[in-house]
């Protein structure tokens, strides 16, 4: 099968399109003929590698994909050849206490497709039946690949970790990313007010189009925390901050929060070490929580909202699969708003 894989770590040029044998499925797995795959920043981290990462090469990347079931394992009961499907990229052992109590993200074997096992950047990929979701007939395969990782991540952040409720003011750093644009829509679905930041006019307009109430250009308004406090929240601060930026914004995020506020951290793109003024935490009774991916139930809930049209995965650009290196470079430049996809012939 045709696949995009690495044989060694390095820059994006280490990603090769070539031929590999198709994966063999276990009794509880299905084999999917890929129609679309979506890019994620984890692709870039994996290509680069990190200390302690020891992948068996060649390694096929790709954490989001949709397609048609080609083969089912002997124990698979809910699917058959020809089903159009989307996939939860989070896999776990399925047997431990955490898995059996619905907390798959706390399983010690939890991983993302394409992280340790082979992913979706191939003509065929395999996945346990429990991760597969049949698509309604009217739902398109491109959106079925664009949605899972980002919407699952954003849904768990707001619903489970931040316990968002109606009327909450949600502040989102960097509106252009896949998780951020999903979070804007989910926060609006939960009847909140959304304040987002971004760096250019075009992204400001797009963030407003998908529901952000206020969008701030952080380059033009570097003291935006003051602006939010005084002008947008009547000197209260916000209920929830979503901060995947890390070092560059951590202090600002603490300042933005009101009494009882929740800071949710799904990443730290500008670096992992930040200074904290601890007084903010106890004076304001703040909660600081991490979040990463989500559980099977959360996946099914958020996909149901997408299938019903309450949430709409935004696709920025679709490349041909053969141009996947171009697509990864495009993602790396950070100019996109929403997801970058590759399409299989
Ligand atoms: Zn488990």
Image (cartoon, rainbow, N blue to C red):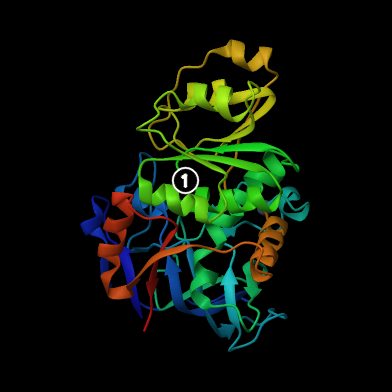
Quarter placement of the N terminus: bottom left
Taking the view exactly as shown, the residue that stands out farthest to the left is 13
Q: Quadrant of residue 288?
A: top right
Residue 117 vertical placement versus 236 (above, below): below
Pick the residue in front: 196 or 54. 196
Q: What SS does tag 1 mark?
A: loop
Q: Is residue 89 visible?
A: no
Instruction: Give the side of residue 167 with respect to residue 280, left or right.
Output: right
Note whether ligand 1 is within 8 Å of mark 1: no
Q: Is residue 50 left or right of residue 252?
A: left
Q: Position of residue 296 (x, y in %)?
A: 69, 59
The residue pinned by badge 1 equals: 175
Q: Residues within 10 Å of mark 1 (few under 14, many from 20)?
A: many
Which residue corresponds to the image point at 27% horizontal and 51% vertical from the top-left? Answer: 9
The residue sitting at 45% across, 79% down in the picture is: 35
In the figure, 60 relative to 230: above or below?
below
Instruction: Check the image and report above or below for 71 versus 249.
Output: below
Quadrant in which residue 254 is drawn: top right
In the picture, the quarter occupied by the C terminus is bottom left
Q: Residue at coordinates 59% horizontally, 42% vertically from top-left?
A: 194
Q: Is residue 2 left or right of residue 111?
A: left
Of all residues shown, which one is farthest toward the bottom? 82
């Amino acid at each position: 099968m045709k696949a995009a894989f690495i044989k060694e770590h390095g820059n994006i040029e280490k990603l090769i399109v070539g031929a590999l044998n198709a994966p063999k499925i276990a009794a509880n797995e299905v084999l999917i003929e890929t129609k679309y795959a979506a890019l994620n920043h984890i692709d870039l981290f994996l290509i680069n590698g990190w200390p302690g990462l020891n992948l068996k090469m060649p390694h096929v990347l790709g954490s989001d994909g949709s397609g048609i079931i080609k083969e089912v394992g002997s124990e698979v009961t809910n699917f058959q050849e020809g089903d159009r499907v989307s996939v939860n990229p989070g896999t776990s052992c399925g047997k431990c206490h955490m898995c059996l109590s619905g907390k798959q993200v706390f399983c010690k074997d939890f991983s993302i497709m394409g992280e340790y096992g082979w992913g979706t950047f191939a003509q065929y990929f395999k996945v346990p039946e429990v991760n597969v979701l049949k698509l309604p007939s009217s739902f398109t395969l491109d959106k079925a690949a664009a949605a899972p990782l980002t919407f699952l991540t954003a849904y768990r952040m707001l619903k489970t970790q931040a316990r968002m409720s109606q009327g909450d003011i949600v502040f989102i750093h960097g509106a252009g990313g896949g998780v951020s644009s999903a979070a804007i829509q989910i926060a609006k679905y939960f009847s909140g007010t959304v304040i987002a930041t971004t760096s250019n006019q075009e992204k400001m307009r797009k963030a407003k189009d998908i529901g952000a109430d206020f969008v701030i250009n952080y380059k033009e308004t570097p003291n935006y925390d003051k602006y939010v406090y005084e002008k947008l929240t009547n000197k209260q601060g916000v209920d929830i901050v979503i901060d995947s930026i890390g070092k560059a914004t951590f202090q600002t995020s603490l300042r933005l929060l009101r009494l009882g506020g929740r800071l949710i951290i799904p990443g730290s793109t500008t670096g992992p070490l930040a200074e904290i003024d601890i007084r903010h935490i106890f004076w304001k009774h703040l909660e600081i929580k991490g979040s990463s991916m989500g559980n099977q139930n959360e996946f099914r809930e958020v996909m149901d909202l997408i299938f019903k049209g309450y949430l709409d995965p935004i696709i920025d650009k679709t490349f041909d699969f053969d141009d996947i290196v171009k697509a990864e470079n495009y993602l790396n430049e950070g100019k996109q708003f929403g997801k970058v996809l590759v399409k299989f012939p």
